[in-house]
Amino acid sequence: MHIQKNISLKPYNTFGIDVLAKQFVSINSINELIDVLKSENHQSKFILGGGSNMLLTQDIDALVLHLNLKGISIISKSENTVLVKASAGENWHNFVLWCIDNDFGGVENLSLIPGNVGTAPIQNIGAYGVELKDVFDSCEALHISSGTIRTFNHQDCQFDYRNSVFKNEKKGEFIILNVTFKLTTKNHQIKTDYGAIASELKQKNIKKPTIKDVSKVVIAIRSSKLPDPKKIGNSGSFFKNPVISIKHYSALKQNFPDMPSYSVSENLVKVPAGWLIEHAGFKGKTFGNYGVHKNQALVLVNYGNANGIDIKNLAQLIQKTIVRIFNIELEVEVNII
Ligand code: EPU
Protein backbone atom coordinates (compact mmCIF):
# COMPACT_ATOMS: atom_id res chain seq x y z
CA MET A 1 0.00 0.00 0.00
CA HIS A 2 1.55 3.25 -1.13
CA ILE A 3 0.16 6.71 -0.42
CA GLN A 4 1.04 9.12 -3.22
CA LYS A 5 0.95 12.92 -3.06
CA ASN A 6 -0.50 15.49 -5.49
CA ILE A 7 -1.82 13.01 -8.02
CA SER A 8 -3.89 14.16 -10.99
CA LEU A 9 -7.39 12.64 -10.92
CA LYS A 10 -7.85 13.08 -14.68
CA PRO A 11 -7.51 9.33 -15.44
CA TYR A 12 -9.88 8.48 -12.59
CA ASN A 13 -13.01 10.42 -13.61
CA THR A 14 -14.92 9.82 -16.84
CA PHE A 15 -15.45 13.58 -17.30
CA GLY A 16 -11.66 13.76 -17.62
CA ILE A 17 -11.36 16.79 -15.33
CA ASP A 18 -7.80 17.54 -14.26
CA VAL A 19 -7.78 18.27 -10.54
CA LEU A 20 -5.25 17.15 -7.93
CA ALA A 21 -5.73 14.78 -5.02
CA LYS A 22 -3.66 15.92 -2.03
CA GLN A 23 -3.07 12.23 -1.25
CA PHE A 24 -4.06 9.11 -3.16
CA VAL A 25 -3.99 5.40 -2.43
CA SER A 26 -5.17 2.38 -4.40
CA ILE A 27 -6.98 -0.16 -2.22
CA ASN A 28 -6.71 -3.79 -3.33
CA SER A 29 -8.26 -5.68 -0.42
CA ILE A 30 -10.73 -5.19 2.40
CA ASN A 31 -7.91 -5.58 4.92
CA GLU A 32 -5.95 -2.80 3.23
CA LEU A 33 -9.04 -0.63 3.40
CA ILE A 34 -9.52 -1.28 7.11
CA ASP A 35 -5.80 -0.60 7.75
CA VAL A 36 -5.87 2.72 5.89
CA LEU A 37 -9.01 3.85 7.67
CA LYS A 38 -7.36 3.04 11.02
CA SER A 39 -3.91 4.46 10.36
CA GLU A 40 -5.12 7.58 8.57
CA ASN A 41 -8.02 8.26 10.91
CA HIS A 42 -6.97 11.90 11.40
CA GLN A 43 -7.42 12.62 7.67
CA SER A 44 -10.57 13.34 5.72
CA LYS A 45 -11.24 10.69 3.07
CA PHE A 46 -12.72 10.74 -0.38
CA ILE A 47 -13.99 7.46 -1.83
CA LEU A 48 -13.42 6.97 -5.53
CA GLY A 49 -14.95 4.11 -7.50
CA GLY A 50 -15.23 4.26 -11.28
CA GLY A 51 -15.48 8.07 -11.19
CA SER A 52 -18.34 7.91 -13.68
CA ASN A 53 -20.95 9.96 -11.85
CA MET A 54 -19.05 13.02 -10.68
CA LEU A 55 -18.03 16.46 -11.82
CA LEU A 56 -14.86 17.60 -10.08
CA THR A 57 -14.69 21.37 -9.73
CA GLN A 58 -11.73 21.67 -7.33
CA ASP A 59 -8.65 19.91 -6.00
CA ILE A 60 -9.45 17.25 -3.40
CA ASP A 61 -7.93 18.24 -0.10
CA ALA A 62 -8.21 14.73 1.35
CA LEU A 63 -6.87 11.21 1.10
CA VAL A 64 -8.48 9.72 -2.00
CA LEU A 65 -9.18 5.99 -1.62
CA HIS A 66 -9.31 4.41 -5.04
CA LEU A 67 -11.29 1.19 -4.61
CA ASN A 68 -9.75 -1.55 -6.68
CA LEU A 69 -11.40 -4.59 -5.04
CA LYS A 70 -11.79 -7.34 -7.64
CA GLY A 71 -13.52 -10.70 -7.95
CA ILE A 72 -16.73 -12.27 -9.21
CA SER A 73 -18.05 -15.52 -7.77
CA ILE A 74 -21.14 -17.70 -7.76
CA ILE A 75 -22.62 -17.89 -4.26
CA SER A 76 -25.41 -20.39 -4.86
CA LYS A 77 -27.60 -21.84 -7.59
CA SER A 78 -31.21 -22.96 -7.49
CA GLU A 79 -33.39 -24.32 -10.27
CA ASN A 80 -33.88 -21.08 -12.23
CA THR A 81 -31.73 -18.53 -10.47
CA VAL A 82 -28.20 -17.88 -9.34
CA LEU A 83 -26.69 -15.54 -6.74
CA VAL A 84 -23.53 -13.86 -8.01
CA LYS A 85 -21.29 -11.72 -5.85
CA ALA A 86 -19.10 -9.07 -7.50
CA SER A 87 -16.53 -6.90 -5.77
CA ALA A 88 -16.94 -3.14 -5.76
CA GLY A 89 -13.96 -2.41 -8.02
CA GLU A 90 -15.14 -4.61 -10.90
CA ASN A 91 -15.94 -2.59 -13.99
CA TRP A 92 -19.73 -2.66 -14.46
CA HIS A 93 -19.74 -3.51 -18.15
CA ASN A 94 -17.14 -6.29 -17.70
CA PHE A 95 -19.43 -7.73 -15.05
CA VAL A 96 -22.38 -7.61 -17.49
CA LEU A 97 -20.29 -9.39 -20.14
CA TRP A 98 -19.26 -12.03 -17.60
CA CYS A 99 -22.96 -12.66 -16.83
CA ILE A 100 -23.79 -12.97 -20.52
CA ASP A 101 -20.88 -15.36 -21.12
CA ASN A 102 -22.27 -17.53 -18.32
CA ASP A 103 -25.83 -17.17 -19.67
CA PHE A 104 -27.00 -15.44 -16.48
CA GLY A 105 -29.90 -13.10 -17.30
CA GLY A 106 -31.07 -9.81 -15.82
CA VAL A 107 -28.36 -7.23 -16.48
CA GLU A 108 -28.23 -7.33 -20.31
CA ASN A 109 -30.25 -4.09 -20.67
CA LEU A 110 -27.65 -2.42 -18.44
CA SER A 111 -24.80 -3.11 -20.89
CA LEU A 112 -22.14 -0.46 -21.45
CA ILE A 113 -23.03 1.72 -18.46
CA PRO A 114 -19.76 3.31 -17.30
CA GLY A 115 -18.59 2.93 -13.70
CA ASN A 116 -17.96 0.16 -11.22
CA VAL A 117 -20.12 -2.45 -9.49
CA GLY A 118 -19.71 -0.78 -6.08
CA THR A 119 -21.22 2.52 -7.12
CA ALA A 120 -24.10 1.02 -9.11
CA PRO A 121 -26.46 0.68 -6.10
CA ILE A 122 -25.76 4.23 -4.87
CA GLN A 123 -27.65 5.80 -7.77
CA ASN A 124 -29.63 2.67 -8.69
CA ILE A 125 -28.28 2.73 -12.26
CA GLY A 126 -30.89 2.15 -14.92
CA ALA A 127 -31.37 1.95 -18.66
CA TYR A 128 -33.76 0.56 -21.26
CA GLY A 129 -36.48 -0.46 -18.83
CA VAL A 130 -34.29 -2.12 -16.18
CA GLU A 131 -32.85 -0.74 -12.97
CA LEU A 132 -30.21 -2.20 -10.70
CA LYS A 133 -32.90 -2.77 -8.04
CA ASP A 134 -34.51 -5.40 -10.33
CA VAL A 135 -31.49 -7.72 -9.95
CA PHE A 136 -30.17 -6.61 -6.58
CA ASP A 137 -30.09 -9.15 -3.76
CA SER A 138 -27.85 -7.48 -1.15
CA CYS A 139 -24.57 -5.69 -0.64
CA GLU A 140 -21.89 -5.59 2.01
CA ALA A 141 -20.60 -2.21 3.11
CA LEU A 142 -17.96 -1.01 5.52
CA HIS A 143 -19.11 1.47 8.12
CA ILE A 144 -16.31 4.04 7.94
CA SER A 145 -16.34 5.33 11.50
CA SER A 146 -16.66 1.97 13.31
CA GLY A 147 -14.85 -0.31 10.81
CA THR A 148 -17.65 -2.89 10.93
CA ILE A 149 -19.15 -4.60 7.90
CA ARG A 150 -22.93 -4.45 7.44
CA THR A 151 -25.15 -6.29 4.97
CA PHE A 152 -27.86 -4.22 3.29
CA ASN A 153 -30.80 -6.13 1.86
CA HIS A 154 -33.09 -4.80 -0.83
CA GLN A 155 -35.40 -3.00 1.55
CA ASP A 156 -32.54 -1.40 3.50
CA CYS A 157 -31.32 0.28 0.32
CA GLN A 158 -34.58 2.23 -0.26
CA PHE A 159 -34.10 2.22 -4.02
CA ASP A 160 -35.86 4.83 -6.10
CA TYR A 161 -35.31 6.44 -9.51
CA ARG A 162 -31.54 7.17 -9.57
CA ASN A 163 -31.60 7.15 -5.79
CA SER A 164 -30.94 5.04 -2.69
CA VAL A 165 -30.25 5.27 1.03
CA PHE A 166 -26.55 5.76 0.16
CA LYS A 167 -27.37 9.13 -1.42
CA ASN A 168 -29.53 10.22 1.49
CA GLU A 169 -29.69 9.05 5.13
CA LYS A 170 -26.44 7.05 4.95
CA LYS A 171 -24.55 9.42 2.64
CA GLY A 172 -20.79 9.27 3.25
CA GLU A 173 -21.14 6.72 6.07
CA PHE A 174 -20.45 3.48 4.20
CA ILE A 175 -18.13 2.09 1.55
CA ILE A 176 -19.79 -0.60 -0.55
CA LEU A 177 -17.45 -3.60 -0.74
CA ASN A 178 -19.41 -6.00 -2.93
CA VAL A 179 -22.85 -6.52 -4.41
CA THR A 180 -24.79 -9.78 -4.73
CA PHE A 181 -27.12 -10.09 -7.69
CA LYS A 182 -30.02 -12.47 -8.25
CA LEU A 183 -29.94 -13.54 -11.90
CA THR A 184 -31.78 -16.09 -14.00
CA THR A 185 -30.16 -19.24 -15.39
CA LYS A 186 -33.07 -20.14 -17.68
CA ASN A 187 -36.40 -18.70 -18.90
CA HIS A 188 -34.75 -15.29 -19.02
CA GLN A 189 -37.14 -12.32 -18.85
CA ILE A 190 -36.23 -10.59 -22.08
CA LYS A 191 -37.23 -6.90 -21.92
CA THR A 192 -37.43 -5.28 -25.30
CA ASP A 193 -40.27 -2.78 -24.93
CA TYR A 194 -38.12 0.27 -24.14
CA GLY A 195 -37.19 2.68 -26.90
CA ALA A 196 -35.45 1.33 -29.94
CA ILE A 197 -34.64 -2.21 -28.68
CA ALA A 198 -37.59 -3.93 -30.38
CA SER A 199 -37.14 -2.08 -33.68
CA GLU A 200 -33.38 -2.79 -33.76
CA LEU A 201 -34.04 -6.51 -33.18
CA LYS A 202 -36.65 -6.50 -35.91
CA GLN A 203 -34.24 -4.86 -38.30
CA LYS A 204 -31.75 -7.64 -37.57
CA ASN A 205 -34.53 -10.14 -38.10
CA ILE A 206 -34.10 -11.57 -34.60
CA LYS A 207 -37.46 -12.98 -33.51
CA LYS A 208 -36.48 -14.83 -30.33
CA PRO A 209 -33.71 -12.70 -28.83
CA THR A 210 -31.23 -14.15 -26.35
CA ILE A 211 -29.73 -12.05 -23.56
CA LYS A 212 -26.65 -11.74 -25.77
CA ASP A 213 -28.77 -10.30 -28.61
CA VAL A 214 -30.33 -7.76 -26.24
CA SER A 215 -26.93 -6.78 -24.88
CA LYS A 216 -25.57 -6.27 -28.40
CA VAL A 217 -28.54 -4.11 -29.39
CA VAL A 218 -28.26 -2.01 -26.21
CA ILE A 219 -24.55 -1.54 -26.89
CA ALA A 220 -25.35 -0.40 -30.44
CA ILE A 221 -28.07 2.05 -29.29
CA ARG A 222 -25.94 3.48 -26.50
CA SER A 223 -22.92 3.84 -28.78
CA SER A 224 -24.98 5.77 -31.33
CA LYS A 225 -26.42 8.21 -28.77
CA LEU A 226 -24.00 8.50 -25.90
CA PRO A 227 -20.38 9.66 -26.16
CA ASP A 228 -17.68 7.13 -25.21
CA PRO A 229 -16.00 8.60 -22.10
CA LYS A 230 -12.65 7.26 -23.35
CA LYS A 231 -12.97 9.63 -26.31
CA ILE A 232 -15.10 12.51 -25.01
CA GLY A 233 -15.25 13.20 -21.28
CA ASN A 234 -18.74 12.93 -19.80
CA SER A 235 -20.74 11.55 -16.91
CA GLY A 236 -23.79 10.19 -18.73
CA SER A 237 -27.05 11.95 -17.95
CA PHE A 238 -26.19 15.15 -16.15
CA PHE A 239 -29.77 15.73 -14.97
CA LYS A 240 -32.61 13.48 -13.84
CA ASN A 241 -35.77 13.32 -15.88
CA PRO A 242 -38.16 15.62 -13.97
CA VAL A 243 -41.54 14.56 -12.66
CA ILE A 244 -44.32 17.13 -13.02
CA SER A 245 -48.07 17.25 -12.41
CA ILE A 246 -50.46 16.24 -15.18
CA LYS A 247 -51.97 19.73 -14.85
CA HIS A 248 -48.61 21.36 -15.54
CA TYR A 249 -47.96 18.95 -18.40
CA SER A 250 -51.36 19.63 -20.00
CA ALA A 251 -50.70 23.37 -19.85
CA LEU A 252 -47.28 22.91 -21.48
CA LYS A 253 -48.77 20.68 -24.17
CA GLN A 254 -50.74 23.69 -25.48
CA ASN A 255 -47.49 25.36 -26.50
CA PHE A 256 -45.36 22.23 -27.02
CA PRO A 257 -47.64 19.57 -28.51
CA ASP A 258 -44.71 17.20 -29.22
CA MET A 259 -43.42 17.06 -25.64
CA PRO A 260 -43.11 13.36 -24.71
CA SER A 261 -44.09 12.00 -21.29
CA TYR A 262 -44.15 8.74 -19.31
CA SER A 263 -46.87 8.07 -16.79
CA VAL A 264 -45.71 7.90 -13.16
CA SER A 265 -49.01 7.91 -11.26
CA GLU A 266 -52.55 9.20 -11.61
CA ASN A 267 -51.41 12.80 -11.15
CA LEU A 268 -47.79 12.76 -12.22
CA VAL A 269 -45.77 12.33 -15.41
CA LYS A 270 -42.06 12.17 -16.14
CA VAL A 271 -40.76 14.24 -19.03
CA PRO A 272 -37.41 13.61 -20.72
CA ALA A 273 -34.92 16.28 -19.65
CA GLY A 274 -33.08 15.68 -22.95
CA TRP A 275 -36.15 16.85 -24.87
CA LEU A 276 -36.47 19.99 -22.72
CA ILE A 277 -32.78 20.86 -23.12
CA GLU A 278 -32.91 20.25 -26.86
CA HIS A 279 -35.99 22.47 -27.21
CA ALA A 280 -34.28 25.17 -25.15
CA GLY A 281 -31.67 25.26 -27.93
CA PHE A 282 -28.70 23.73 -26.13
CA LYS A 283 -28.30 20.43 -27.99
CA GLY A 284 -24.89 20.26 -29.70
CA LYS A 285 -23.85 23.71 -28.43
CA THR A 286 -20.16 24.06 -27.69
CA PHE A 287 -18.51 26.66 -25.52
CA GLY A 288 -14.80 26.33 -26.26
CA ASN A 289 -13.72 22.97 -24.91
CA TYR A 290 -17.01 21.88 -23.33
CA GLY A 291 -20.66 21.75 -24.26
CA VAL A 292 -23.84 19.73 -24.73
CA HIS A 293 -23.59 16.49 -26.67
CA LYS A 294 -24.94 16.55 -30.23
CA ASN A 295 -26.86 13.25 -30.02
CA GLN A 296 -28.22 13.39 -26.46
CA ALA A 297 -28.86 16.78 -24.87
CA LEU A 298 -28.89 15.27 -21.38
CA VAL A 299 -25.15 14.71 -21.55
CA LEU A 300 -22.66 17.52 -20.90
CA VAL A 301 -19.24 16.92 -22.41
CA ASN A 302 -15.59 17.86 -21.97
CA TYR A 303 -13.90 18.07 -25.37
CA GLY A 304 -10.44 18.73 -23.97
CA ASN A 305 -9.09 20.36 -20.89
CA ALA A 306 -12.35 21.81 -19.66
CA ASN A 307 -12.64 23.16 -16.17
CA GLY A 308 -15.26 21.61 -13.88
CA ILE A 309 -16.48 25.06 -12.83
CA ASP A 310 -17.26 26.00 -16.45
CA ILE A 311 -19.33 22.83 -16.85
CA LYS A 312 -21.10 23.51 -13.55
CA ASN A 313 -21.91 27.05 -14.75
CA LEU A 314 -23.27 25.64 -18.02
CA ALA A 315 -25.47 23.25 -16.02
CA GLN A 316 -26.80 26.20 -14.01
CA LEU A 317 -27.49 28.18 -17.19
CA ILE A 318 -29.43 25.20 -18.56
CA GLN A 319 -31.40 24.89 -15.31
CA LYS A 320 -32.33 28.60 -15.34
CA THR A 321 -33.35 28.45 -18.99
CA ILE A 322 -35.56 25.39 -18.42
CA VAL A 323 -37.29 27.15 -15.52
CA ARG A 324 -37.84 30.24 -17.68
CA ILE A 325 -39.26 28.36 -20.67
CA PHE A 326 -41.07 25.42 -19.06
CA ASN A 327 -41.27 26.35 -15.36
CA ILE A 328 -39.59 23.00 -14.57
CA GLU A 329 -36.72 22.56 -12.11
CA LEU A 330 -34.09 20.13 -13.39
CA GLU A 331 -32.34 18.17 -10.67
CA VAL A 332 -28.66 17.41 -11.20
CA GLU A 333 -27.93 13.68 -11.33
CA VAL A 334 -24.13 13.68 -11.04
CA ASN A 335 -22.30 14.54 -7.83
CA ILE A 336 -20.73 17.98 -8.13
CA ILE A 337 -17.61 18.11 -5.98
N1 EPU B 1 -34.83 13.26 -26.31
C1 EPU B 1 -34.80 14.39 -27.09
N2 EPU B 1 -33.60 15.01 -27.27
C2 EPU B 1 -32.46 14.58 -26.71
C3 EPU B 1 -32.49 13.43 -25.91
C4 EPU B 1 -33.70 12.76 -25.71
O1 EPU B 1 -35.81 14.82 -27.63
O2 EPU B 1 -31.42 15.20 -26.95
C5 EPU B 1 -36.10 12.52 -26.17
C6 EPU B 1 -36.07 11.25 -27.03
O3 EPU B 1 -36.47 11.49 -28.32
C7 EPU B 1 -37.02 10.36 -26.30
C8 EPU B 1 -36.84 10.77 -24.86
O4 EPU B 1 -36.23 12.05 -24.86
O5 EPU B 1 -38.35 10.63 -26.66
C9 EPU B 1 -36.06 9.78 -24.05
O6 EPU B 1 -34.74 9.66 -24.57
P1 EPU B 1 -33.77 8.41 -24.25
O7 EPU B 1 -34.46 7.14 -24.56
O8 EPU B 1 -32.46 8.69 -24.88
O9 EPU B 1 -33.65 8.39 -22.68
P2 EPU B 1 -33.50 9.51 -21.58
O10 EPU B 1 -34.76 9.59 -20.80
O11 EPU B 1 -32.98 10.78 -22.17
C10 EPU B 1 -32.72 7.84 -19.72
C11 EPU B 1 -31.61 7.69 -18.75
C12 EPU B 1 -30.35 7.19 -19.45
C13 EPU B 1 -30.65 5.85 -20.09
C14 EPU B 1 -31.81 6.04 -21.07
C15 EPU B 1 -32.26 4.74 -21.67
C16 EPU B 1 -32.04 9.33 -17.01
C17 EPU B 1 -31.62 10.60 -16.37
N3 EPU B 1 -31.35 8.96 -18.08
O12 EPU B 1 -32.37 8.87 -20.64
O13 EPU B 1 -29.37 6.98 -18.44
O14 EPU B 1 -29.52 5.34 -20.77
O15 EPU B 1 -32.96 6.60 -20.37
O16 EPU B 1 -32.91 3.99 -20.70
O17 EPU B 1 -32.97 8.70 -16.53
C18 EPU B 1 -27.46 7.87 -17.31
O18 EPU B 1 -28.12 7.78 -16.27
O19 EPU B 1 -26.29 8.30 -17.31
C19 EPU B 1 -28.08 7.49 -18.58
C20 EPU B 1 -27.46 7.65 -19.74
Image (spheres, rainbow, N blue to C red):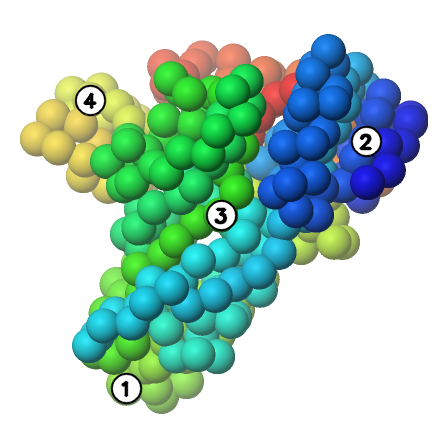
Amino acid at circle 2:
Phe
Whole-number angstrom distance, CA of label 3 to CA of label 4: 38 Å
- Residue 334 is tagged as none
What residue sits right under mark 1 in the picture?
207
- Does the residue tagged 2 have its C-beta within 8 Å of any atom of ligand 1? no
Q: Which of the pair 206/187 is nearer the observer?
A: 187
Q: From the viewer's perspective, tell me whether residue 279 is left or right of residue 76.
A: right
Q: Mark 1 near mark 4, Cβ–Cβ under 8 Å?
A: no
Q: Which of the pair 281/111 is nearer the observer?
A: 111
What residue sits right under mark 2 in the picture?
24
- Residue 178 is tagged as 3
Secondary structure beneath dot 2 equals strand
- Nearest to viewer (mark 1 / mark 3): 3
Whole-number angstrom distance, CA of label 2 to CA of label 3: 22 Å
Residue 312, above or below 102: above
Q: Mark 3 near mark 4, Cβ–Cβ under 8 Å?
A: no
Whole-number angstrom distance, CA of label 1 to CA of label 3: 36 Å
| Comes first in the chain, label 1 or label 3 | 3
**Residue, x 40% and y 34% (percent of image)?**
150
